[in-house]
Amino acid sequence: MPGAVVEEHTHAGELTVEVRTDRILEAVRALKDGATQFSRLSGVTCADFPDEPSRFRLAYHLHSLQSGRRVRLRIWAGGLDPEVDSVTSVWPGAEWQEREVYDQFGVRFRGNPDLCRILNPLDWDGHPLRRDYPIGGEAVEFTDAV
Amino acid sequence: MSATDRESTFPLAMEGREALVAASREGRPLTPTERAIAQVEALTPQEAAERTISNEMLADRRPGSREPLIINLGPNHPSTHGVLRLIVELDGEIVRDLTPVVGYLHTGIEKQCENKTWWQAITCVTRMDYLAPFANIHAYTMAVETLLDMDIPPRAEWIRVLLSELNRLASHLVFLGTSGLEMGAMSVFFYCYRERDEVLDLFEMVSGERMNHLYFQVGGCAEDLPEGFLERLTRLLAQMPGRIDEYEALLTANPIWIDRLKGIGVIPAEQLLGLGITGPTLRAAGVPFDLRKSQPYSGYEYFQFDVPTEIAGDSYARYLVRVREMRESVKIMQQVIDGLPGGPVQSDDRKVVLPPHEELAYSMEALIHHFKLVTEGFMVPEGEAYATVESPRGEMGCYVVSDGGPKPYRVHMRDPSFVNLQALRPLAKGGYLADLIAIIATLDPVMGGVDR
């Protein structure tokens, strides 16, 4: 994959590979079907860095059943309407985890067959795991009758 | 907008309206899940009464032209293991389609963790998968320890293994008892809960709490095992093989149990892997994937045990795998008791671990460390880590991100129940409604873990 890898480092014994956001699908396909045999997707998750140019850092944890090795793929997503490619075509099991990221961070996944909220109520306002989302921010409506 | 206004503008029940609001806000069509929710919620009782099909209409219809019956199972239903809601499309008794709706137990634990110190966050993570609290904290503390590059004393590691296995035993006992209850085998529930109660008593001895323990800490365990614990555990372990025989005598060759479970809920192992399924469900389909063997952590490599697998991949195989795992857990615990090393149960890194209580009386330095740790918490170097343990339900992963401060920047738990629940739809599609209950039972999701 020439040009897809932005950075590669090992920290605390874990290999992290940062790839270009538009090449993620290509990267996971190559890692899954290539000699590395990262056949299993363990998890998809995200962290929010509001001060970065692209604020959402997504992490894909891949695992090889054959060798037991793990790798973390990292991409950044930003802008007003952050959107990345869904990996559900490679691993159908990514569906709910991508829905969770969409629900909590507002990152959309192009190609996810059922991209709606999963943990919060369907019409919830905002994305709670963003760093600028206030904690305890819900006004409670008390009635006069106790 | 008051409640009555809402009803007059939208003749929809609450959640059907929510689905429409969400889709119109983003200007997109309803997704399959939203459509299912809107569909099941769309009819008010009055509308439903108007649309009731008369007997003449039914007689007029040709076979095969039936409309599906959409029923809403849960979120409060005795057979769905907590607040799981299923929108089921039925043709007679055949499940044509089903849509799981989760989130009813969502408490924002991951958000809560970001506002606690690394140490306090343990209080939150232990409450997620409430049947496997030790697995939750184990994954979390291992991830934090990876970032801190910390060594844990061997005695602490062995105690962690001991309690994780005891937890696996308790969790599988709940699985067996409640599954029996759901299949109509009432007595097995009482047998299982008798032993589970004994296990909870042991947990209480160790941590002071019967559930949601705070016993594992970053750097080791909170305290050493209390006096009399190992003797009491040894007594329980001596009884357990006989007790497991009792459960098996009730179920394994029971024709009703076999009828309800054999051949129910099978999909190929390849598909299970694609869906990310782990734990007993995957092992029952012939894939011997167990993190305790493939990536030994906390010293699992020192113990002799088998990873039970089956090839059928049906609900009965999942039951058999769990029963045999209980026997293996008993074996592991016996080995821990026989070879438990001495020494401290906590790391001696005073920047992370609280000083021993008696030291506070004479050491100024210990007092300062204690004060700093309690008021501010310990610092974790910048970076990210992902630690996984084999929980009773599969791969429990914890992803932590640190910005170098005293609070986690991000804590994410990859909960096996959440991922495994995705298999419910392919497993149950095309089967009977009654089999759906058997499949939920043997998938064994814990909704506290699913919704977090």
Image: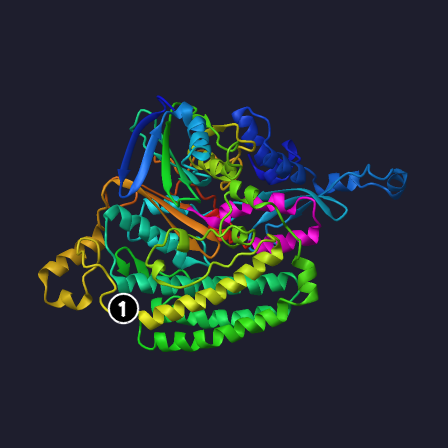
Residue plotted at (40% across, 51% down): B294
- The answer to which of B403 and B35 lies nearer the viewer is B403
User: What percent of the width, then of the height, locates residue B147?
Assistant: 26, 46
Query: Does residue A136 appear to the left or right of B309 in the view shown?
Result: left
User: What percent of the width, then of the height, locates residue A36?
Assistant: 40, 36
For label 1, the residue is B341
Query: Does residue B365 appear to the left or right of B325 in the view shown?
Result: left
Q: Is residue B117 visible?
A: no
Note whether B232 is above or below A22 in the view shown. Answer: below
Residue B440 included in the magenta stretch of the image: yes
Task: Give the magenta range.
Answer: B414-443
Q: Is residue A120 visible?
A: yes
**Main SS type for the magenta part?**
helix
User: What percent of the width, then of the height, locates residue B67?
Assistant: 77, 38
Q: How is the image coloured?
A: rainbow
Note whether A87 is above or below B399 in the view shown. Answer: above
Q: Secondary structure at mark 1?
A: loop
- The answer to which of B49 and B327 lies nearer the viewer is B327
Q: Chain of mark 1?
A: B
Q: Amino acid at mark 1?
A: Pro
Query: Does residue B306 appear to the left or right of B247 in the view shown?
Result: left
Q: Residue furthest top?
A: A3
Residue plotted at (46% across, 27% down): A85
Residue B166 included in the magenta stretch of the image: no
Note whether B205 is above or below A116 in the view shown. Answer: below
Residue plotted at (38% across, 66% down): B209
Total numbered circles: 1
- The answer to which of B314 and B434 lies nearer the viewer is B314
User: What percent of the width, then of the height, locates residue B196?
Assistant: 49, 69
Note whether B199 is above or below A44 in the view shown. Answer: below
Number of residues whose C-alpha sits closer than 10 Å to that of mark 1, classed few (under 14), some (14–19) or many (20 or more): some
- The answer to which of A134 and B113 lies nearer the viewer is B113
